[in-house]
Amino acid sequence: MMAAHPPRYAGGPCFVCGEPWPCFERQLSTLVEFAGRGELLVAYMGDWYRLGVEERQRRGLPPDPGMELRHLGWLDMVLPAQGEQRSGDV
Ligand SMILES: [Zn+2]
């Protein structure tokens, strides 16, 4: 399956719709692709984030302050709560 809405380059805008990447369309398709595999999803978007930071530096572009939120800020909404202890269950 071809990934929908690829970035023009890591850290750059969406190739298809021109929105800052990952655009909403890509976030949705990534969610579907990684459904039930939250840890992989976090690793995947974390890789893209690191690549994006490096690529922007390589191109001499200023840091994008919204990038971390766009890549990673929405993931905790879709992941099961971390650190929930069930040991107290009766
Ligand atoms: Zn897009």
Image (tube, rainbow, N blue to C red):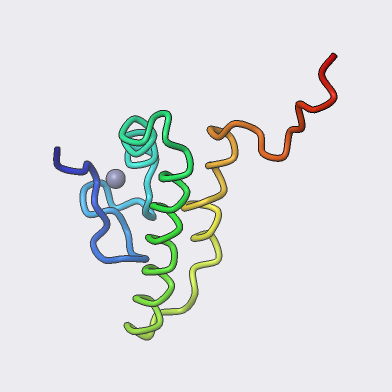
**Residue drawn at x 49%, y 75% as measured from the top left:** 63
**Residue drawn at x 37%, y 69% as measured from the top left:** 51
The x, y position of residue 10, in whole percent, is: 31, 65
Q: In which quarter of the image is ligand 1?
A: top left
**Residue drawn at x 43%, y 62% as measured from the top left:** 49
- 41 relative to 36, above or below: below
Answer with the quarter of the image where residue 54 lies: bottom left
- 54 relative to 34, above or below: below
The x, y position of residue 30, in whole percent, is: 34, 39
Residue farthest along the top direction in this orientation: 90
- 64 relative to 23, above or below: below
On screen, residue 90 versus residue 60, left or right, reads: right
The x, y position of residue 23, in whole percent, is: 37, 46
Answer with the quarter of the image where residue 74 lies: top right
The x, y position of residue 34, in whole percent, is: 36, 36
On screen, residue 2 versus residue 13, left or right, reads: left
